[in-house]
Image (spheres, rainbow, N blue to C red):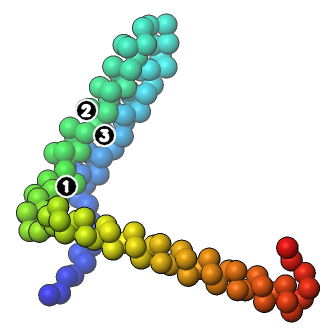
């Protein structure tokens, strides 16, 4: 299986669409400050409207279509996953807890031995 990385230059129309989308977001934010005397919900509605317009513009660009293709292929891959049942999940969790307890005891013991050796060799320590 060979995956090649394709580097494609975006077209002029997609650059224009992205520029307009950025301008829509900036216009929504600018409207928030221009309408400073208005109600807060109206100001936030302008910001959300700018973001919604920008999302709509990007959705009809090449990036929007690539995002749709990615989401469709992600759903296909998600269907291939075999999830463990309740018993397997419980056993795996138990094994992890036991291993963590054993590792904790091991490192606690190692710390005690090394602290004792340090005290014995240097005469320092509690």
Of residues 62 and 49, the one nearer the viewer is 49
The single residue placed furthest to the bottom in the displayed view is 121
Whether 110 is drawn above or below 56: the answer is below
Decide if residue 42 is in sight here: yes
Report if the CB atoms under discs 2 and 3 are less than 8 Å apart: yes
Across and down, in percent, residue 19 comes to 33, 44
Q: Earlier in the sequence, mark 3 or mark 1?
A: 3
The structure residue drawn at horizontal position 85% and vertical position 89%, both measured from the top left corner, is 120
**Occupied quadrant, residue 30:** top left
51 sits to left or right of 106:
left
Q: CA distance from mark 2 to mark 3?
A: 7 Å
Q: Secondary structure at mark 2?
A: helix
Across and down, in percent, residue 13 comes to 22, 50
Disc 2 crowd, CA 10 A, few/some/many (<14, 14-19, 20+) = some
Disc 3 crowd, CA 10 A, few/some/many (<14, 14-19, 20+) = many
Of residues 28 and 112, the one nearer the viewer is 112
Q: CA distance from mark 1 to mark 2?
A: 17 Å
48 sits to left or right of 120:
left
Q: Earlier in the sequence, mark 1 or mark 2?
A: 2
Select label 1 or label 2 by which is in front: 1
Q: Secondary structure at mark 3?
A: helix
Would you name the residue on which mark 2 appears? 53
Would you name the residue on which mark 1 appears? 67
Whether 4 is drawn above or below 50: the answer is below
Would you name the residue on which mark 3 appears? 21
């Amino acid at each position: 299986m060979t995956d090649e990385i394709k580097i494609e230059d975006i077209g002029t129309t997609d650059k224009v669409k992205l520029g307009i989308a950025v301008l829509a977001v900036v216009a929504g934010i600018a409207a928030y400050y221009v309408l400073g005397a208005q109600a807060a919900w109206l100001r936030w509605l302008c910001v959300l409207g700018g973001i919604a317009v920008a999302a709509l513009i990007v959705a009809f660009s090449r990036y929007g279509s690539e995002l749709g293709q990615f989401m469709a292929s992600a759903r296909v891959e998600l269907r291939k996953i075999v999830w463990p049942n309740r018993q397997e999940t419980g056993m795996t969790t138990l094994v992890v807890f036991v291993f963590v307890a054993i590792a904790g005891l091991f490192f606690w013991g190692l710390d005690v031995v090394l602290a004792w050796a340090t005290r014995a060799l240097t005469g320092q320590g509690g």
